[in-house]
Amino acid sequence: MLPRLLCTGLIVSGLAVAGGCSKSEPSKTEVENASAPMKAAAVIEKKNVVDKAPESGVDYHSFANSNDYQVQHLDLDLSVDFSRKVLEGEAKLDFERLNDKNQPMVLDTRELEVVSVSANGAPVNFSMGEKDGHLGTPLNIDLPEDATSITIRYRTAPGASGVQWLEPQQTAGKNHPFLFTQAQAIHARSFIPLQDSPKVRITYNATVHTPRELRAVMSANNDPKTAKNGVYEFEMPQRIPSYLIALAVGDLQFKPMGERTGVYAEPSMLESAAAEFADTESMLEATEKAYGPYHWDRYDLLILPPSFPFGGMENPRLSFITPTVIAGDKSLVALIAHELAHSWSGNLVTNASWRDLWLNEGFTTYLTNRIMQFVYGDERYQMEMALGYGDLQADLADKEPRDEIMAIDLRGRDPDEVFSNIPYEKGSLFLYELEQKVGREAFDRFLMEYFNHFSFQSITTEDFVKYLDETLLKEHADKLDRARIQQWIFEPGVPEGAPHPQSDAFAKLDPVRQQWLDGQLAAGDIDTKDWTFHQWKYFLDGMPEKLSDAQLKQLDNAFGLTESRNNEVAFSWLMIAVRNDYEPAFDRLENFLTSIGRNKFLRPLYRNMVETGKKDVAARIFERAKVGYHPLSVKVNSLVIYGKKEA
């Protein structure tokens, strides 16, 4: 997931953790002997637990006792009911017993109505535990001693956090409803009862029943030739974590883009999407050449309605993509490179907990930039790197030290809070420094071997550091410093002397901007005919906080910024307009906020409005728009505007 185009070790002693912690912290022995839910309960929603580091390999955001039982395979049979906005059916979980204790199995759920649970063809006792504000509700199941599978009949809630139901008017075609899921970070439990932890990898099969006129697709083997008959069957033969299970249902058509790549979209968007992302096959081939084989058979894209809260989601075999990156000139396709790169870093080698997210996103951001270089050349690579560095600096200026750590302590917090430019851009910059020190050829070889060594595994930050010790650090002991590596991963900020990616294409814009600000150059005299989106973004984002009304009008009249169709450029301009009370842009601002659900845009704009005294306007627009937002967007922006989760 890509935040810019939006979407872990030891903690430094003395850093505070958000949320609370109890005055009587459990002993180390008690924690080590506890099941996963007991470990979570020992630290989550309690006060003053920062004396000890997060325990490596423990998922503090799952109730599941995956040290006693580990699910191996999931069979789903679900019916999609648009009238009631529920998914209903059953989930059969095949599991392996890891000891002979025969304790109750604990699964993760959120707002699920569990109708029955059976094992060996007979009902078994189950109970719902205490609801947690971040984690949902544990499902406790009594098991027969010989049981190796259970079947759970259930239905989802209409407001499930990982499911969005769209009315026909909220889609491109306006004729049919649409459904899509978003499981990352811990939202799979809102539509499937399971061990919702990235350290648990499963295969799955699914049968999905839909209205006959609609098509279902999943993060599995999709056959575009399957007739629309209301029943769709899927198989995912590779082991994946739960957050990569994904489903969408709508009026979808398919167009191939290459031998292994294609795009699903509503009919009115299909051709433009296929043209915009036509280089996907080239990206796939270039990445394979550098980092090893693609293990997922096909790589297709699903273009979602604009309410999708992220730029993209790397669901294997079928990445979910926002339509906001269809700019008509391929200027925003770094998002496609990012989601494709996750096929190696994230989907193939996965973070074992959300503390370790940088292993997914830092590696993927680094690979994204390399893919862009492979396909589009050095100048594009340098601009992407420089923009990423700027995004990182902005986040570092805005965050508390504890949130600047790559191996972040998330105990007591919603794991959705981990998504920032720290795991993405700081993680990428760390890898870029390693590359600079050992040389690109050696570092590419290390990455290929790393993906091969840990393929289809979920690993911790400590696993990575140990592997680094045994490989790159041993081979290049004269060039790498283990203490500095520890500093990168486990301490706030960016180490002194870190690389500072820059672009000649940006450097020449600084004097132009300054000349205009000084009144030495009229906006209409600036030669922008060859500017890329990246240069526009750099030019606008480098403006001072305050501009005069005359300056704003001059820019707008010269370049039509209020009406820009490139969403990245429009976003940068609207941020300036909000800060400076530029009323001619306010109609576009409202239209932008009510037609796009991508949090990369929504959250900064709403926050900007609140901070500049426009909270009432922000609230009015939000109340109008939220019916079309994803539940995650509603939660995040309610916090920004009202200081609470729900408006």
Image (tube, grey):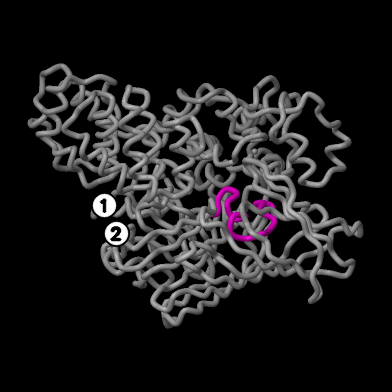
Q: Check disc 1 and report its element: helix, strand or loop.
A: loop
Q: Earlier in the sequence, mark 2 or mark 1?
A: 2
Q: Amino acid at mark 1?
A: Ala
Q: Main structural element of the magenta stretch: helix, strand or loop?
A: loop
Residue shown at the point (12%, 22%) measured from the top left: 550
Horizontal side of residue 531 vs 144, given as left or right: left
For the record, the magenta segment spans 183-199
Q: Quadrant of residue 356?
A: top right
Q: Position of residue 254 (x, y in %)?
A: 36, 72
Q: Residue furthest right?
A: 100
Residue shown at the point (29%, 40%) measured from the top left: 534
Asked whether residue 27 is drawn in magenta, I would say no
Q: Is residue 84 above or below residue 426?
A: below
Residue shown at the point (34%, 33%) measured from the top left: 618
On the question of residue 118 being in view, the answer is: yes
Numbered tag placed on residue 465 in the rendering:
none
Residue with the mark numbered 2? 276
Q: Looking at the image, which is closer to me, 119 or 113? A: 113
The reply to whether callout 2 and callout 1 are in contact (CB within 8 Å) is: yes
Q: Residue furthest top?
A: 518
Q: Residue furthest front?
A: 84
Numbered tag placed on residue 327 in the rendering:
1
Q: Position of residue 614 (x, y in %)?
A: 31, 26
Q: Looking at the image, which is closer to me, 323 or 611? A: 611
Horizontal side of residue 426 vs 44, given as left or right: left
Q: Position of residue 408 (x, y in %)?
A: 62, 34
Q: Is residue 195 above or below residue 428?
A: below
Q: Looking at the image, which is closer to me, 547 or 582? A: 582
Q: Amino acid at mark 2?
A: Glu
